[in-house]
Amino acid sequence: MSLIEVNHLRKEFPNATPLKDVNVTVDRGEVISIIGPSGTGKSTFLRCLNRLETPTSGQILVDGVDMCDPNVDLDAMRQKMGMVFQSFNLFDHLLVAENIMLGPTHLLGMGKQEAYELSLKLLAQVGLKDKALNYPRELSGGQKQRVAIARGLAMNPDILLFDEPTSALDPTMVSEVLAVMRDLASRGLTMMVVTHEMRFARDVSTRVFYMDRGECWEAGPPEQIFEHPQRQETYDFIFRVRNWTWTVDDVDHDYPAMIASLMRFGERQFLSRRIANECEIVVEELLEQFLLSTARKHGLRDLGIKLTLSIAEGGEQAQLEVDYSRYAAAGITWEEILACSDEISSALIDRMTSNQSVGTGVLRCTIG
């Protein structure tokens, strides 16, 4: 018997129906990543599983018990399913250890000393034993989320649910939380993770659910979902999340916002620091020293420069496409653009890229 079996799950709100007809199963020891566009019911699905949301119709069997039965003992069933939220949901007036002790003492009847020792053990597991007597406000976002994971583990659940656990974190903190989740997966804990971290979904999951328009449109092992998707919608989504795009319309564009967006993309794709740095340098040099300097010299406005960065399998290479077709339409050749750049910028581009090709208004190159 599957640990979780969902049949024809539907959830309606007065102005929306985030879940239309979800049918999935989860076996013990599986790590399920739930991916898909925003607003397609992924978080609502998790909240229905442990009845934080009440389904409109359908059936959710957890260890053979129907969570939708009006007579179900929700408190007892929720002990089987820990939940980690994107916003941490820690009690700021309690110590870190006390946050973890709440469930075992109040719901399991555990003594305070035993619960405290359990909290230290779990904090050690997530690398935060030395923070037991701190308050949550004294921790970074990544540390707070690791405490939230320890709190979820304190009830010894059969399954741990993660609702976009890294979405509220700065890029530098994402990796520390994902490292803890990878460790939990290696220990055989059953996990369901709503995530936008595609590298985690591909490398750690036993299966991936692709959700769209309130349904699970495709489910399968990561290799199938990421390399051989069966549905066009899955393919389109996977292709989109592996690509970063940015459009520059004016010489006075928001450069800091562009670089910040590029850095976030690199973090989500788990690019090596070297490749991420080289991508930032190449984008900056091509844009600032080649294209924008040319625009200023020729008085070109309404630039419409489109940058597209695609990550190759393994994350050790990236393909950059620069669409500067409005330059070509204005009669500005690539040779004229090259003439506006300095020798240092040209040398950097030549050193960091390969397979350069220039078509009519499009430059393509490989970074790494």
Image: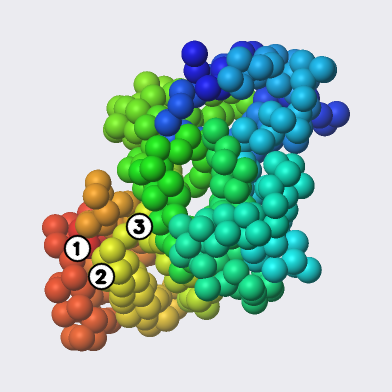
- Location of the C terminus (image quadrant): bottom left
Q: Is residue 364 above or below residue 171?
A: above
| Identity, as a three-letter code, of the amino acid under mark 2 | Arg
Q: What's the mark number on residue 368?
A: 1
Residue at mark 1 to residue at mark 3: CA–CA distance? 14 Å
Which residue is denoted by mark 2 in the rendering? Answer: 274
Which residue is denoted by mark 3 in the rendering? Answer: 270
38 or 358: nearer the viewer:
38
Location of residue 101 by image quarter: bottom right
| Identity, as a three-letter code, of the amino acid under mark 1 | Gly
Tell me which residue sits at (69%, 34%) in the image: 78
Element carrying mark 3: loop
- Residue 232 image offset from top left, x and y in percent: 42, 25
Tell me which residue sits at (64%, 38%) in the image: 43
Tell me which residue sits at (16%, 80%) in the image: 347
In the figure, is residue 226 to the left or right of 217?
Answer: left
Is disc 1 in contact with disc 2, using a CB cutoff of under 8 Å?
yes
Tell me which residue sits at (42%, 81%) in the image: 296
